[in-house]
Image (cartoon, rainbow, N blue to C red):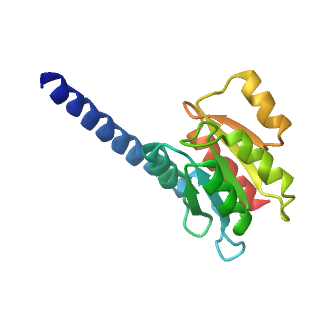
């Protein structure tokens, strides 16, 4: 029973820590980043998020969403659901984790590219598997960007802002 209490306390600490990180990152990624433009001049960038961890997904939604600029239009955590949603309602960009609850992010990239969507969505790989062979394979499948989850949250946001401006 003691170990269960310790496990609960550890879980609570992790959740509290993630909430603190979300708050700090969200404050640090405000309009002061210099990437904001008049929202009347361009429509929001439509982004679909593929991530199997609810905590990471919630963090990404907070970090990436920018009213009038970047709109998270949907999310899922499986290959089948993700591909069906993107083919049914094409988006400007897809942020995809490679390791999913069911299926694979690599297969999602491959299916999106084979669908020849017009306009062609930008694919941003955001993974805990930043090894060179994984990056090489994602780029062979025509991912546009490849970022490391342990380092690049702000870089993903900046990339989406730049895509919106282009």
Percent position of residue 16, x then y: 29, 40
Relative to residue 108, is residue 44 depicted above or below? below
Instruction: Give the percent coordinates (x, y) of residue 89.
Output: 70, 69
Q: Is residue 34 visible?
A: no
Q: Quadrant of the N terminus?
A: top left
User: Which residue, as the protein is rendered here, is positioned at the far left?
Assistant: 1
Q: Residue furthest bottom?
A: 40
Q: Give 5 or 139, whichever is nearer the viewer.
A: 5
Q: Position of residue 32 (x, y in %)?
A: 54, 54
In the rendered structure, the answer to whether residue 92 lies left or right of residue 24 reads right
Picture coordinates of residue 50, whole percent (x, y)? 60, 50
- When asked about the image quadrant of residue 153, the answer is top right
**Which residue does the image show at 74% across and 22% down from the upper left?**
132
Q: State how many labels appear.
A: 0
The answer to whether residue 45 is visible is yes
Q: Compared with residue 112, is residue 150 higher up or lower down, i.e. above or below?
A: above
The residue nearer to you, when weighing 8 against 21, is: 8
Horizontally, is 18 left or right of 111 in the view?
left
- The structure residue drawn at horizontal position 73% and vertical position 61%, both measured from the top left corner, is 92
> Which picture quadrant has residue 155?
top right
- Quadrant the C terminus occupies: bottom right
Which residue: 75% across, 46% down? 109
Residue drawn at x 79%, y 45% is 110
Q: Is residue 77 above or below residue 48?
A: above
């Amino acid at each position: 029973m003691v170990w269960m209490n310790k496990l609960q306390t550890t879980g609570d600490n992790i959740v509290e820590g993630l909430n603190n990180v979300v708050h700090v990152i969200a404050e640090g990624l405000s309009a002061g980043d210099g990437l904001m433009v008049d929202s009347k001049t361009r429509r929001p960038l439509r982004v679909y998020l593929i991530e199997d961890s609810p905590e990471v997904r919630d963090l990404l939604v907070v970090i990436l969403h920018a009213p009038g600029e970047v709109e998270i239009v949907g999310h899922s955590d499986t290959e089948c659901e993700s591909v069906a949603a993107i083919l049914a309602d094409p988006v400007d960009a897809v942020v995809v984790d490679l390791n999913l609850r069911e299926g694979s992010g690599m297969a999602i990239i491959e299916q999106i590219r084979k669908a020849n969507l017009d306009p062609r969505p930008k694919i941003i790989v955001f993974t805990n598997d930043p090894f060179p062979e994984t990056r090489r394979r994602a780029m062979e499948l025509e991912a546009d960007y490849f970022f490391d989850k342990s380092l690049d949250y702000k870089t993903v946001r900046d990339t989406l802002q730049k895509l919106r401006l282009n």
